[in-house]
């Protein structure tokens, strides 16, 4: 490896370690909660060329649903998505922020990014919320999320709306369904 390649490698590795991202190599396989670099992402969920992965975070929390009257059939009831509520942590389990309605990701340093869904892939796991690609619609603060332009929600576990329990007796009630996901932030 020539000196320029070594220098570039050290810079990339250092940036990755500082931002909390972790690859498949260099860790124990039995760590189920380890964060994964996106190895195989559906084409619709890929970020624009030139964007740089700056952070990988685990989201653990709930997807909140509300029981409402079906807008197409007033004799039916359905669960509709209301908002996420999750803690964000790095590979070592250290809290780095939170995720909530908007959808918004807020770092402990006060910086925020609000996203809008650009693409979804529902074929990943029938029992989990879909994987997503989101574009940043606004950023605030000068910290971790100040320059985020894209977010991927991958490796989701659970979080889907309940399949029953929404009826006239439960109208307006909320259901909080636990989920986990990995979030990939790009500048």
Image (cartoon, rainbow, N blue to C red):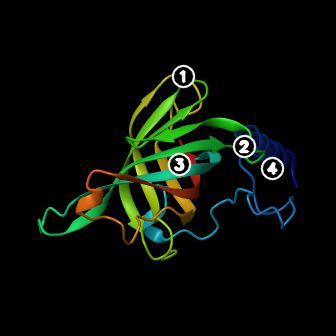
Q: To which residue does mark 4 refer?
A: 5
Of labels 2 and 3, the one closer to you: 2
Spatial CA span between label 2 and label 3? 17 Å
Mark 4, Cα crowd under 10 Å, few <14 / some 14-19 / many 20+, is: few
Spatial CA span between label 3 and label 1? 19 Å
List x then y, in percent, for residue 131: 48, 64
Mark closest to the chain's N terminus, 1 or 2: 2
Left or right: residue 2 compared with residue 105: right
Quarter of the picture containing the N terminus is bottom right
Q: To which residue does mark 3 refer?
A: 51
Name the residue: 18% across, 64% down: 70
The relative height of residue 8 versus residue 142 in the rendered view (above or below) is: below
Relative depth, front residue between 31 and 117: 31
Q: To which residue does mark 1 refer?
A: 142
Mark closest to the chain's N terminus, 4 or 2: 4
Q: Which mark is residue 37?
A: none
List x then y, in percent, for residue 21: 71, 48
Of labels 4 and 2, the one closer to you: 2
Of labels 1 and 4, the one closer to you: 1
Mark closest to the chain's N terminus, 3 or 4: 4
Name the residue: 73% across, 45% down: 16
Q: To which residue does mark 2 refer?
A: 20
Mark closest to the chain's N terminus, 1 or 4: 4
Q: Secondary structure at mark 2?
A: loop
Q: Secondary structure at mark 1?
A: loop
């Amino acid at each position: 490896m020539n000196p320029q390649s070594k220098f570039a490698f050290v810079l990339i590795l250092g940036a990755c370690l500082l931002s909390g991202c972790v690859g498949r190599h260099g860790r124990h396989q039995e760590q189920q909660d380890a964060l994964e670099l996106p190895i195989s992402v559906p084409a619709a969920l890929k970020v624009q060329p030139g964007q740089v992965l700056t952070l990988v975070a685990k989201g653990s929390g709930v997807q909140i649903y509300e029981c409402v009257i079906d807008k197409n059939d007033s004799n039916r009831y359905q669960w509709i998505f209301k908002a996420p509520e999750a803690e964000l942590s790095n590979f070592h389990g250290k809290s780095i922020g939170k995720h909530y309605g908007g959808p918004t990701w807020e770092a402990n340093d006060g910086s925020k990014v609000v996203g809008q869904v650009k693409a979804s892939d529902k074929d990943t796991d029938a029992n989990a919320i879909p994987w997503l690609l989101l574009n940043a619609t606004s950023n605030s603060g000068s910290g971790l999320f100040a320059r985020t332009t894209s977010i991927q929600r991958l490796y989701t576990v659970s979080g889907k709306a309940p399949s029953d329990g929404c009826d006239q007796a439960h109208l307006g009630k909320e259901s909080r369904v636990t989920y986990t996901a990995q979030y990939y932030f790009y500048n």
